[in-house]
Amino acid sequence: MAVSNEDDLFRLLPAVGQLLQKSEFEHLSQRFGRARVKAVAQSALDKLRDRLHRAEIVEPEELSEMISNLGARLETSLEASLTPSLIRLINATGVLIHTNLGRAPLSSHVARAILDLATGYSNLEYKVEEGRRGHRDQHFEHRLKSLLPCEAATVCNNNAAAVFLILNTLAAGKEVLVSRGELVEIGGSFRIPAILEKSGAKLREVGTTNKTRISDYQEVISEQTGLILKVHPSNYRIIGFTAQVRSQELVELANRASVPLVEDAGSGNLFPSRHVALSRERAIESSLLEGFDLVCFSGDKLLGGPQAGIIAGRQSLIEEIRKNPLMRVLRVDKLTYAALEGTLIEIEKGESGEATPIWKMLTTPLSELEPRVQHLSSRLEASGWTNQIVSTRALLGGGSAPEESIPSLGVRIETTSQSPNALERSLRTRHGVISRIENDHVILDLLTVLPEQDDQILFAFRQISNQAVDSATAKPEHFSPTRE
């Protein structure tokens, strides 16, 4: 093709209207919508024009080829743009309640309950037998009351919101007594003092960072006190020269002063557990039996359910919270209620709450992990991947039991063909397998890998092997990669 000068190269660029009249672009318009295709096509033409201005394209044949391939390129781009960004991953990190990976996985039973509710209408706020409006808390409150010694319960969108609602309802304009050792920062840089301030309550620090005594509370409690707040220490612990106030002392003081005693229990550990990792983790049941007026906790940590902030305790205080206009702002939808009720049903059927996926992982004996890790190791070896079975220490995560670890088993990958960082990145970005690097080796901890995902891990490694030979190998069907 003969082109006399630079201006003639620009003349080769078609108008967007001309492109849309071609059959391949009409086909794209039918699939993705004309307006969307027009916008993407215009953007592609603008980029070509910009490259011409910068003299990155100087040959007419090269430009013509790019224009002829524009339809195929736009189709790929449009398909990628409609790929969901929220995708399923394989957690091989050994952190059970991994905040970045969505915390507690739900069981298939609960997932089916969510799907059933999501695809139709429901009795979310309707009493079928009476034919009148009901309250959405009815779908979980009676189940929580059957598990815990509480008079009532309500739920909002997360535990930080639960703390905020309690403070705003019961202590706005009043002082809230908190031990200095409990003024923690939780995930996402949210701090208890900041939540207190936004709620309208006034923080009154008590004691010191490492030592707080009941006398410290007695010295500052007054008519200006709205409530006493005890806070879960989350992902840290103070050890050494320390002192904490016994719960019974706080209960007696709060009763004498007629102020509510509230505990932010954080992790949602319902019952006392014999598991070594939870030996020092307070239980919701214990706090309520000891006399705390309200206890709030997360739904997607040790409870093993959806993201939610659950408040349980005295009925009169729960009713006040329900009447707070902010309750409507922070309330949860039908899908959360479905997941929460389904999770509580599983706990009712199980023993001490050990029926959810999180608890099944937590209580999995090494004797069950061993055949899985041996099978995966031998199949990886057969696929050309040198590896070693190793003893590992998994973590509970989610701010629970920060000093405790759980015995586990994993596979350590020995590779000289690529660096551990390159392998970890390939597993993560191309195959959705999230591993960890330890002592310059990629480790796959099987405690947090669901049994049905073992074959997917093997498939990922086989794909990586093939890609080393042929970079055009297709991506696995079970994983939709994120756009980088």
Image: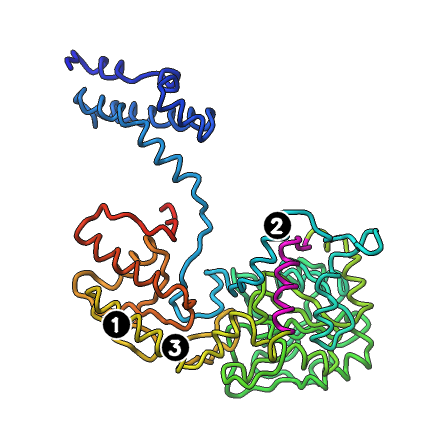
Mark identifier at residue 118 = 2
As shown in the figure, which amino acid type bears the numbered disc 2? Ala
Front residue of this view, candidates 319 and 221: 319
- Give the magenta range: 330-348
Residue 331 in the magenta stretch? The answer is: yes
Main SS, magenta residues: helix
Dot 1 falls on a residue whose secondary structure is: helix
Front residue of this view, candidates 458 and 207: 458
As shown in the figure, which amino acid type bears the numbered disc 1? Ser
Q: Do residues under tags 2 and 3 come within 8 Å of each other at their CB atoms?
A: no
The CA span between labels 3 and 1 is 14 Å
Badge 2 density bin: few <14, some 14–19, many ≥20, Cα 10 Å: few
Q: Answer with the quarter of the image where residue 69 lies.
A: top left
Look at mark 3 in the image and give the residue it sits on. 369
Q: Position of residue 50 (x, y in %)?
A: 29, 25
Q: Position of residue 37 (x, y in %)?
A: 42, 27
Dot 2 falls on a residue whose secondary structure is: helix
What residue is at 30 percent from the left and 63 percent from the top? 458
Q: Is residue 401 above or below residue 421?
A: below
Look at mark 1 in the image and give the residue it sits on. 378
What residue is at 65 percent from the left and 76 percent from the top? 284
Q: Position of residue 225 (x, y in %)?
A: 77, 71
